[in-house]
Image: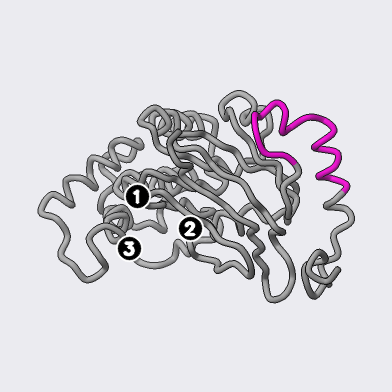
Amino acid sequence: MAPPAIRIENLTVVHGRRPAVHHLSGSVAAGSLTAIVGPNGAGKTTLLRAIAGLHPPAEGRVSLAGRVALLPQAAALDRGFPISCRDVVLLGLWGRVGAFAPMPPDAAERAEAALAAVGLSGFARRPVGTLSAGQFQRLLFARLLLQDAPILLLDEPFTAVDARTAADLLAIIRRWHGEGRTILAVLHDLDLVRAEFPEALLLAREAIAWGPTEQALSAGNRLRARMMAEAWDDTAAACARDAA
C-alpha cells in the first residue's frame, strides 16, 4: 500500500494555553477527498493551519508526503492592499521558485491561464479590492492552480459565494481529485459533504469519528459532537488529559 499523504500522530494544538485540537491521530490516504466538519470552535481551521506548518503543535507531529497548498478563509484576508489579480495569482509560484528568485518566463501567461480557468478572463489588471466575494474566491482558486501542489487544504471554500460560483469551484475540486491530488476541506454543508466527499473527519477539538462519510456523520456522532461543544470550558489553562 502507498504511504498516506498526511499522517497525524497525537497532535495537540493550542491558542495561548487554551486547547484547540486534542490528541488527534489518523491518516489521510493519498488521492482521497476528505471533509472536516464540526461545531464552531471545534479546531477545524487550526488543524488545517497545523498541517500546513503555520501553527506549531504543542505536542505530536504531522508528516506529509508532498508539498501542501492552503486555501485560507477569504474573510480572514486583507483585500485593501493595492495589488492586481495577476500578482495575487503569481504569489502561487513563490513556494516553488522562492521569494527572491526571478519568475519563470511564462509566469504571466500561466497566471492568465489560471484566471481564465476559474472564470476571471480579463481580470489580470483589476485591483483585488474591486472584486466581489465570489470573484475573490475564484481568484484564490487560481492561485492554487499555480501552486500545483499534490496536497490541497481548503478552508471553507464555498463560504459567501453564490450558487453558480460554488458549482464552478466544486467542478475544479472534482478535477483535482480526478488528477489524484489529496484534498482536505473544512465544510459546513452536510448535504454537500455526503454528496461529494467520500471521507469525513467529525472534529470537536478531538476526533469524534473519522472514516467513510455516512458512518462518521451518523446522528449519534453528531449528537456527541454537539454535546461536547456545549461542555467546552474556554477558560481551561491546559489540556485536560495532560492535567489528569
Residue kind at label 1, given as amino acid type: Arg
Secondary structure of the magenta portion, mostly? helix
Front residue of 209 and 147:
209
Disc 2 on helix, strand or loop?
Answer: loop
Assess whether residue 212 is covered by the magenta stretch.
Answer: yes
Q: Is residue 164 left or right of residue 36?
A: left
Front residue of 86 and 28:
28
Magenta residues, as a range?
209-227
Residue kind at label 3, given as amino acid type: Ile
Residue named by callout 1: 143
Percent position of residue 181, x then y = 40, 37
Q: Which residue sits furthest top?
A: 195
Please name which of the two marks, 2 or 1, marks the residue nearer to the observer: 2
Q: Is residue 158 left or right of residue 31?
A: right
Residue named by callout 3: 83
Q: Kindly report the distance in space between the C-alpha atoms of the residues bearing marks 3 and 2.
A: 25 Å
Instruction: State yes or no: discs 3 and 2 in contact (Cβ < 8 Å).
Output: no
Q: Residue 77's mark?
A: none
Residue named by callout 2: 52
Assess whether residue 219 is covered by the magenta stretch.
Answer: yes
Residue kind at label 2, given as amino acid type: Ala
Q: Quadrant of residue 117?
A: top left
- Few, some or many C-alpha atoms within 10 Å of disc 2 (few <14, some 14-19, many ≥20)? some
